[in-house]
Image (cartoon, rainbow, N blue to C red):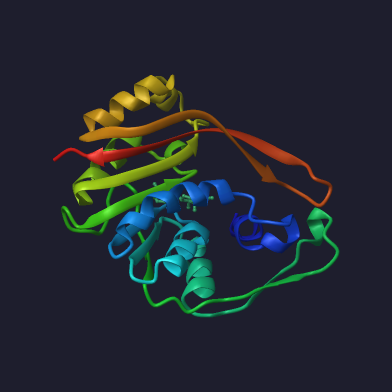
Amino acid sequence: MVVRQTALHLADEIWGCYPFQAVLDYAKNYIIAIQEQSVLEIGCGVGRCIGSIAKHFPKSNCWGIDYSYQMLKQAARVWVDKTDINIDLSSKGFPSSLLIKGYSLRNLQFGLAKANHLPFEDNSQDLVYSSFLLDRLENPQSALIEINRILKTPGKLLVISPLNFRHATHWASCYPPVKLKGLVHKAGFHILDWEEDIIIHEPLDFHGNTVQWKCIRFVAQKTG
Ligand SMILES: C[S@@+](CC[C@H](N)C(=O)[O-])C[C@H]1O[C@@H](n2cnc3c(N)ncnc32)[C@H](O)[C@@H]1O
């Protein structure tokens, strides 16, 4: 999983561009206005989004949270410890190995935690962001409530995710998307922007095979 995430998120050269650029641009649109404040990504994986945000907004105080130690280790190597990483994608048909350059960002930290138990004080964060996480959560409702707890009023939550739940109970509570909207309201948010059927293509190999994800994206503001 770490290798797959590294290849997808950090090896732009092999795909010709960053395959999830649209996801990142969506987040950046909302960060410009609050660039001197705190930004937290939950489920940051190898840190591509929060790393790019920290690089673009050097005055922001950024955190990347994930429950996988291996993901965080790779994220910290690339974004904080300035370690260059070599990846071999010959199993995906690519001809040679690729060197990924490391950075030493001073406004970015990584931490191990679960989305429904975040190690931050009440009312402490300006913006919480997550991509491709919502449908992986054990309990989406409790994560939304926990995010609301740590956000300042009127902090914002940005989510982009497929609705590809793993449990029947999650399908029942969050689908169709109007039910998810209800959970977001119930957790103490006012919805500012809500879009469905956003298509994101995840490239798989040198031949051009892809997986298509049909995503929702929304921005919600803490109501108090
Ligand atoms: C599909 S990856 C998405 C990574 C990245 N955000 C992206 O857009 O590609 C999901 C990430 O969320 C993490 N994750 C899954 N459930 C989590 C939870 N309950 N709390 C924190 N992280 C979680 C996984 O370890 C993984 O790194």
Q: Which residue is rendered at x = 57% and y = 76% of the image?
A: 102
Residue ranking furthest to the left? 224
Q: Which residue is rendered at x = 64% and y = 50% of the image?
A: 19
Q: Which residue is rendered at x = 48% and y = 38% of the image?
A: 161
Residue 54 vertical placement versus 140 (above, below): below
* Residue 33 in picture, x, y percent from top left: 33, 55
Residue 206 vertical placement versus 145 (above, below): below
* Residue 197 in picture, x, y percent from top left: 54, 28
Quarter the N terminus occupies: bottom right
Quarter the C terminus occupies: top left
Snapshot quadrant of residue 85: bottom right
Snapshot quadrant of residue 50: bottom left
* Residue 97 in picture, x, y percent from top left: 77, 70
* Residue 184 in picture, x, y percent from top left: 29, 32
Please tell me which residue lies in front, 48 or 32: 32
Residue 5 vertical placement versus 134 (above, below): below
Q: Which residue is rendered at x = 82% and y = 68% of the image?
A: 96
Residue 219 as seen in the image, left or right of residue 163: left
